[in-house]
Amino acid sequence: MSKIHELGYLAEKVEELKNTGVYRKLPILESPCDAEIILNGKKVINLSSNNYLGFANHPRIKEVAKQAIDTYGVGSGAVRTIVGNTALHEELDRTIATFKREDAAIAFQSGFNCNAGAIQAITEKGDLIISDSLNHASIIDGCRLSRADKTVFQHSDMEDLERVLKERRENYRNVLIITDGVFSMDGDIAKLPEIVALAEKYECMTYVDDAHGSGVLGESGRGTVDHFGLHGRVDFSMGTLSKAIGSIGGYVACNKTAYEWLNHRGRPILFSTSIPPASVAAAIEAIKMLMESTEYTDRLWNNARYFKEKLTALGFDTGNSETPITPVMVGDEAKTMAFSRKLLENGVYVSGIVFPTVPRGAGRLRCMVTAGHTKEQLDQAITIFENTAQEIGIL
Ligand SMILES: *Cc1c(COP(=O)(O)O)cnc(C)c1O
């Protein structure tokens, strides 16, 4: 075997990860993703999931998923354009469109590959994509796959966005402005009314990634567009079925023309096997539950407000969050990771977020409260937060 096949160049990079203290092992979950979990063999309170509504392990949703396995089997067997488009997949598209109050919707296998497939399909050479500086990695990758020119505006800075539009709009055919609806590391909400107004003034299209807005904001979790009453004014309303909806998949809700085009040119629709039937059935049921009742989103917001108020009263800084994503700002990277490790020892799992996911010196613990947490669990977590912070000299 020649030297190259030992992959020494990768071994060196892994060594570098170890030397800079960012090498890690994946935590191992041995229970459903609930408010309490068994992680690395230990029972802890879970403040790290995106399972906002507790749907990932909901009895009613599990039941329909099991039925779908009995009816359709465990795999769809092909991409949607061949025989992988079951009646359930069609129902999912229609259900999403109804929920999101759009004309149509098309479901991909994940939020990530939805962004990777949709952005390149709707833009081309001669177009410009303008993206918020804090947009999600899947948007960045989606933009990279497009042949359009790309540029970034400073996070939620409308003056900077207008500067870009003034300087560059006229040089392009179509311009697409892309933003997260809710920013995943800070929990702040995009200034969507202003973005839409600028898009209309400069004749641009808009694309909102609502991975953290759907199931959370708007009427019964209809998302950021619904929250601001902007139906009909955002061209592409993207979301995920993997977070609040508790299953797996991603989608674009849009008008019929956009649907037709993505159906023909969304590459993951054509070249990657469709979502398994059980996961499709689970997503449909979850969305139906949201359309039937606001009890899940109400409980989520009550829990999130309760937890945030208690943390703030103790003197923790929860940053700019306007949603259930609750960062606890620490600053120093090493301190952030030490805090997270100690919390786990003391019975709470909350992931530390440091550079490069957030800027240097902006280390934080990202707490995710869900509808599934009881008041007792939240109180217990808050006590552990307080004691642990004192133990390591943060409070
Ligand atoms: C999680 C996330 C995605 C990816 O969604 P998956 O369904 O998990 O692939 C896309 N965009 C944003 C903003 C996200 O937070």
Image (tube, rainbow, N blue to C red):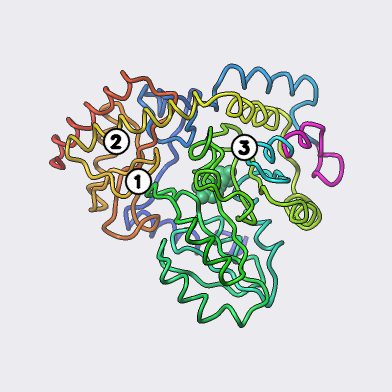
Residue 321, disc: 1
Q: Which residues are magenta?
A: 77-93
Residue 308, disc: 2
Which of the 4 quarters of the picture holds residue 70? top right
Q: Quadrant of the C terminus?
A: top left
Say which residue appears at 60% left-offset and 50% top-offset: 112
Do we see residue 37 in this rendering?
A: no
Q: Quadrant of the N terminus?
A: bottom right
Q: Nearer the viewer, mark 3 or mark 2?
A: 2
Tag 3–tag 2 contact (CB < 8 Å): no
Q: Residues within 10 Å of mark 3 (few under 14, many from 20)?
A: many
Q: Residues within 10 Å of mark 2 (few under 14, many from 20)?
A: many
Asked if the residue at label 3 sits under 8 Å from ligand 1, the reply is yes
The answer to which of marks 3 and 1 sits earlier in the sequence is: 3
Task: In this rendered view, identify the residue nearer to me: 48 or 327.
Answer: 327
Give residue 277's position: percent from left, percent from top: 74, 30
Give residue 94's position: percent from left, percent from top: 74, 37
Give residue 109's position: percent from left, percent from top: 68, 43
Say what amino acid the circle numbered 3 marks: Ile
Let me know if residue 260 is in the magenta part. Answer: no
Which residue is disc 3 drawn over? 248
Element on which disc 3 rests: loop
Left or right of 260: which side holds 236? left
Left or right of 118: which side holds 256? right
The answer to which of marks 3 and 2 sits earlier in the sequence is: 3
Q: Is residue 104 above or below residue 285?
A: below
Element on which disc 2 rests: helix
Tag 2–tag 1 contact (CB < 8 Å): yes
Say which residue appears at 77% left-offset and 31% top-offset: 88
Say what amino acid the circle numbered 2 marks: Lys
